[in-house]
Amino acid sequence: MTKSKNVREAFKRIPSLDEILKSIDLKSLPLHLLKTKIKESLEEIRLEISNNNIPDDIHSYTMKKIL
């Protein structure tokens, strides 16, 4: 596979913001703050992937990094 194809496939495996929010106790933090922090983390993960640093299990890596 080419690098660009690997990166595209990896991007598809990143959990969505909604999926991440479902796994968090939303009563503990203001939602707008939580969404902002998650979006920042997702952007960092996308940058890592675009630099061809693709974890084996993207879903687990993302959840561990955010939670």
Image (cartoon, rainbow, N blue to C red):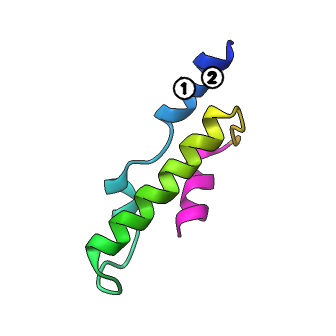
**On the picture, is 34 further left or further right than 10?**
left
Residue 44 at x, y percent in the picture:
56, 51
Q: Disc 2 marks which amino acid?
A: Asn
Q: Main secondary structure of the magenta part?
A: helix
The residue singled out by tag 1 in the image is 9
Residue lying at 37% horizontally and 64% vertically, measured from the top left: 36
Q: How many marks?
A: 2
Dot 2: what SS? helix
The residue lying toward the viewer, choosing from 27 and 51, is: 51
The answer to whether the residues at label 2 and label 1 have Cβ atoms under 8 Å apart is: yes
Quarter of the image where one finds residue 28? bottom left
Badge 2, how many Cα within 10 Å: few under 14, some, many 20+? Answer: some
Q: Disc 1 marks which amino acid?
A: Glu
Residue occupying the far top of the picture: 1
Q: Quadrant of the N terminus?
A: top right
**On the picture, is 14 further left or further right than 2?**
left
The residue lying toward the viewer, choosing from 45 and 64, is: 45
The residue singled out by tag 2 in the image is 6
Residue 48 at x, y percent in the picture:
65, 43
- Magenta range is 57-67
Residue 53 tag number: none
Quarter of the image where one finds residue 35? bottom left
